[in-house]
Image: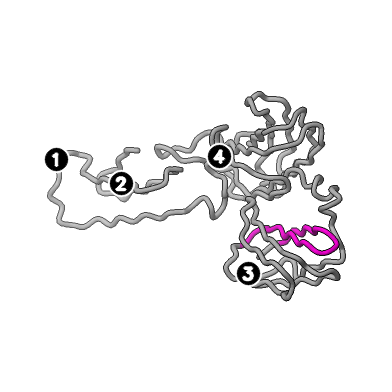
Amino acid sequence: VEDAGNNGQGYVLETSTCDLGKHYFYFRDGTGNDFNSSEQYRFSVTFTPFSSVDLCECNNSFSSACPIGICDTVLAVISPWFNDFNPFIEDEDFYQIELAGSEEVNVNISLVSPNIRICVNIYNSSQVLIDNFSGNIGQALNFNFIPPNDGIYYFKITDCNDNFDSQNQYELTIGCNLISSTNDLEIDKTVQLSPNPFNDQFSIQSEHPIQNLQVFNAIGNQIFFHEGAGFNEIKTDDWQSGIYFILIQTDAGLVVRRVIKR
């Protein structure tokens, strides 16, 4: 990236990168002949990691598609991507997920920004378009999809109206109907979590002995594991705000809970 400002004026650069590692900045006088200033210039860099708003922001192609699992909850934004000081005309979010053939899955996209109209294209493992869906501007999009075969599928999410300037997160979940309808993942009302949403901790009450407990964040990473009974409160001081899934194995079966930290 290379650019120049105007004589005697400050300059602000806004650019995006998915490259990890060192980045170098080189400054010089753009006129090429005036290097006798005795005044200091002030230089600062403000870095805003995408992880603060969009854990999968660098997923704008098939090769960089963000892997997600059944019932993972993803928070992401459709926003400009800055390059050479001009935003790209579009933001495309690609996700890949493994699905079973002929088993209907529900796809839900909520928290849609008022100026965004969600479009979803679905591709098979060969990256061939097999289905597409679109919603209304500012409204959630919910539909069912039946994969024709077992395998990896790609979901591309973008704005049909070409706005691409939202800083509001949308929420994506795929296949939560499979979890709620599977016998060994039956939602058991004998297990209660409170409060939900929570701040620094939450408690668990179970009518059946707990064998183990696992906590996953919105992109499917395990952040907590406890085996055996003897606890009913979980401290969450070091958890980031967001959505989490609690898997509790009791003597009566596996219980899944969706919780939110403020």
Residue 236: give its label: 3
Q: Considering only order in the chain, which callout, 3 or 1, is on the residue closer to the N terminus? A: 1
Q: Nearer the viewer, residue 125 or 249?
A: 249
Q: Nearer the viewer, mark 2 or mark 1?
A: 2
Indicate the secondary structure of the residue bearing disc 4: loop
Q: Nearer the viewer, mark 1 or mark 4?
A: 4
What residue is disc 1 on? 33
Q: Dot 2: few (<14), some (14–19), or many (≥20) neighbours within 10 Å?
A: few
Separation of residues labelled 2 and 4 (CA atoms):
24 Å
What residue is disc 4 on? 59
Chain part drawn in magenta: 241-259
Q: Nearer the viewer, mark 1 or mark 3?
A: 3
Separation of residues labelled 1 and 3 (CA atoms):
58 Å
Q: Residue at x 75, y 29 (%)?
A: 149
Q: Amino acid at mark 1?
A: Asn
Q: Considering only order in the chain, which callout, 4 or 2, is on the residue closer to the N terminus? A: 2
Q: Amino acid at mark 2?
A: Tyr
What residue is disc 2 on? 24
Indicate the secondary structure of the residue bearing disc 3: loop
Q: Is residue 210 magenta?
A: no
Q: Nearer the viewer, residue 47 or 97?
A: 97
Separation of residues labelled 2 and 1 (CA atoms):
23 Å
